[in-house]
Amino acid sequence: MNTFTFNTTKSIICEPGVCKRLGDLVKDQIGKKIFFVTDPGLVDLGLINPALDSLTQAGVTFEVFSDVVADPPASIVEDACAKARALDIDGVIGFGGGSSMDVAKLVALMVGSGEKLDDIYGVNMVKGKRLPLIQIPTTAGTGSEVTPISIITVGATEKKGVVAPALLPDIALLDAELTLGLPASITAATGVDAMVHAIEAYTSTSANNNPVSRVLACEALRLLGENIMRVVTNPGDIDARSNMLLGSTLAGQAFANSPVAAVHALAYPLGGIYHIPHGLSNALVLPHVMTFNAPNCLDEYSALAPCIFPQLAEISDPKERVGQLITQIAQLSKDLGLQTTLREMNIGEDALATLASEAMKQTRLLVNNPREVDEHAALEIYRSAF
C-alpha cells in the first residue's frame, strides 16, 4: 500500500431543514459577525431567507455578498475580500453552488491570512490561516463543501486553482430541502458532475490515490446511480435528494484527496470560453475521455461499473463490461435530457484546436490521468465529442 494523507471537512451535518438552526451553530462555533457569500439567483428565489432568519433569531449580524457569478473571475474575489475586511468579521458562510463556495473559501483565507490571490495559485502555496468557514451547498454536484480547492477564472478564459488544506471548511451543512426547487437540467448536470468526481478519483494516478478515497468513490457512485433519475423525474423526493447530496459530498471527499484528471482538464475550456456550466461541460466529454482511458484502466472501470449500473455485474469479461459502462453513461446523459455533443452547444469544428490548446494548460489535472493526454489526443477527444 502506498503512503497517503487524507484530509476532509471537520464536521458534516446531513439533515433536511438544518439551515433553520444555522444561527445557533454559527453563534456557538464561529461568532456573531458573518460574511454571507451567495449569488443573485438564490437571493431572488428567497432560498437564503430561512438561513438568514435563523441568524437573526440567534443574534448573529451578517453582511450578504451576492455578486457571485458562474466561473467567478478574480475581480469578484477581490471585491468580496475588500468588503469583508471593512466589516471586521468573525467568519464566512458560503451558500450556493460551487462558485459561491469557492469564493467563500478564498474570502475566509485572504481576510484571515492577509495573503494575495496572485501568490496562492497552485498547490500548497497558502501559508496563513483562514477565518472560520461554513459551507452550505444548494446543488448535489461540486462537493466543494469538502474540498481544499477553489477554482477562479483569470483573464478572459483561463481557470486557475488554489489548492491547500487550509481551504477545507469547518462545517458542511447538507440540507436537501435547499435542492428541492432545482430545475431538472441543473439537477442532472450537477449529478453527472459528482459522478465524474468519483470516477476520476478512483482512477487517478496521483501518488495520494488511497483506499479511503476509493471506498468513498464507490459508495458515492452507488448513491448517485440509484437516485439521479429519481430526482430528475420526481424532484420532490426528499430521500432521493438527500442521497444525491450525500453522494456528491462523498465524491468530493474522494477527489479532494485523490485528484481529478482529464475529464476536468478538457471541461474547463468549455466553461472558460463558452460559459457552459461545469457539470454539463464534464458530461459532454466524460464518455469520450473514458473511451480514451479504457486501455490503461480496464480493471478500475470494470470495478466501478456495477456501482453505477448494478446489472453490469452480470458481465464477466472486463472489456465488454467497460464497453457497456461507457455506452450506458452516454445514454444516461441523453435520458436525463442533457445535451451530448459540442455541436449542440453551438461550438464550431474550427474551435476544437483552440480547445485542445487551452486544455494543455491544465497540467495540475492532466498529470493525474491514467493515460497521457497530449494536444493531439485532446483534439481527438474533442472531435469524438463534436
Image (cartoon, rainbow, N blue to C red):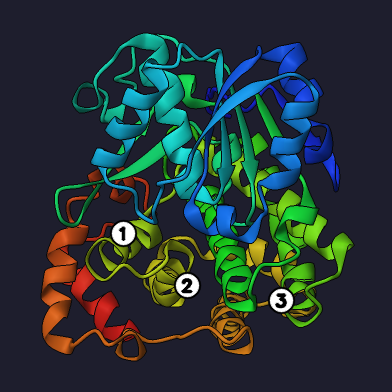
Quarter residue 121 falls in: top left
Q: Amino acid at mark 3?
A: Ser
Secondary-structure class at tag 2: helix
| Residue 166 against residue 373 in the figure, above or below | above
The image's mark for residue 316 is 3
The residue pinned by badge 2 equals: 283
Q: Amino acid at mark 1?
A: Tyr
Quadrant (top left, top right, bottom left, bottom right) of the C terminus = bottom left
CA distance for labels 2 and 3: 27 Å
Secondary-structure class at tag 3: loop
Q: Amino acid at mark 2?
A: Ala
Q: Is residue 289 toward the left or the right of residue 23 in the image?
A: left
CA distance for labels 3 and 1: 35 Å
The residue pinned by badge 1 equals: 268
Mark 1 and mark 2 in contact? Answer it, CB < 8 Å.
Answer: no
Q: Residue at x 26, y 60 (%)?
A: 272
